[in-house]
Amino acid sequence: MPDIADYGAQLYSALRERKTLKPLIAVDPELSIDDAYKISLDLLARRCKDGEKVVGKKIGVTSKAVQVMLGVFQPDFGFLTDAMYIQGDIDVAKTGLIQPRAEAEIAFILNDNLNGPDITAEQVIAATDCIAPCFEIVDSRIEDWKISIVDTVADNASCGVFVIGETRVDPREYDLPNLKVTVTKNGEALSEGLGSAVQGNPAEAVAWLANTLGRHGVTLDAGDIILSGSLVPLEPAKKGDIFEMMLEGIGGCSARFV
């Protein structure tokens, strides 16, 4: 039986000390996704003991491009805390980032609870106050991003920090699968994608998250920020980089690394 608390402690130390670990699945090939989720909860509890508060949840590894890049072929899920929510520049050292990568997403901000399983995309839209352009800066406490689904779930879905653009719009007024995002890095065109890259529709991805967490007794709550997954391939980021994204017809978001 895996020592959940020990793995949680190792990941917590890696986070605080900005170091990486060998893949957990390489250390213990018998670790399951359920084990990984328990490890993630232990890690989260340690962060909350430090004073962090949960402000939302995230789904990751949803698009084909990201799955191929990481070699992980099913979505992961994790929690967002107030310490991850960056308003302004991203201080790489202060935020504890180790090997960050930027991804452009659509953030959902809820005004009602979603208690899975059996949540639909339509129910997600009904429970959403607004959507906004967002950069999630993913980061891994696993060396060289050599992750399996078990590693990334245990490591809180490889979440680092996130930045949300100022624009907030009603999702009912937009065709989410056909929303187009364009991304630049240091002023140069980098990537573009559509909402359909995320399980065919970002609202479907949020429904998947509600249903997956619902099986573990966790709800998506009114006021939660939900990151629905990257519309484009992940891009490595370092101090000095400036990323810009534009969600067509809605607005933009910036991620500046200092």
Image: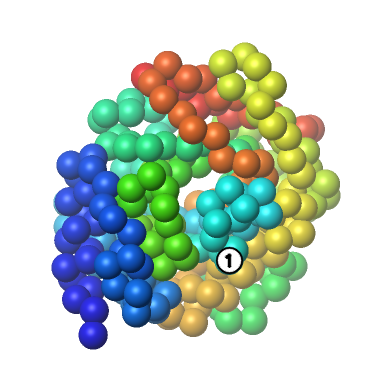
**Image quadrant in which you'd find residue 246:** top right
Can you name the residue that lies furthest to the bottom here?
A: 1
Identified at 33% across, 59% down, the residue is 23
Identified at 65% across, 17% down, the residue is 188
Horizontal arrangement in the rendering, residue 35 relative to residue 199 (left or right): left
**Above or below — where is 182 with respect to 115?**
above
Quarter of the image with the N terminus in it: bottom left
- In this rendering, does residue 100 appear at all? yes
Mark 1 nearby-residue class (10 Å; few <14, some 14–19, many ≥20): few
Amino acid type indicated by mark 1: Gln
Task: Check disc 1 and report its element: helix, strand or loop.
Answer: loop
**Above or below — where is 5 with respect to 46?**
below
Identified at 59% across, 22% down, the residue is 185
Instruction: Check disc 1 and report the residue beneath it.
Output: 74
Identified at 62% across, 41% down, the residue is 233
Residue 166 in the image: x percent, y percent?
57, 31
Is residue 251 or residue 92 the one in the foreground?
Answer: 92
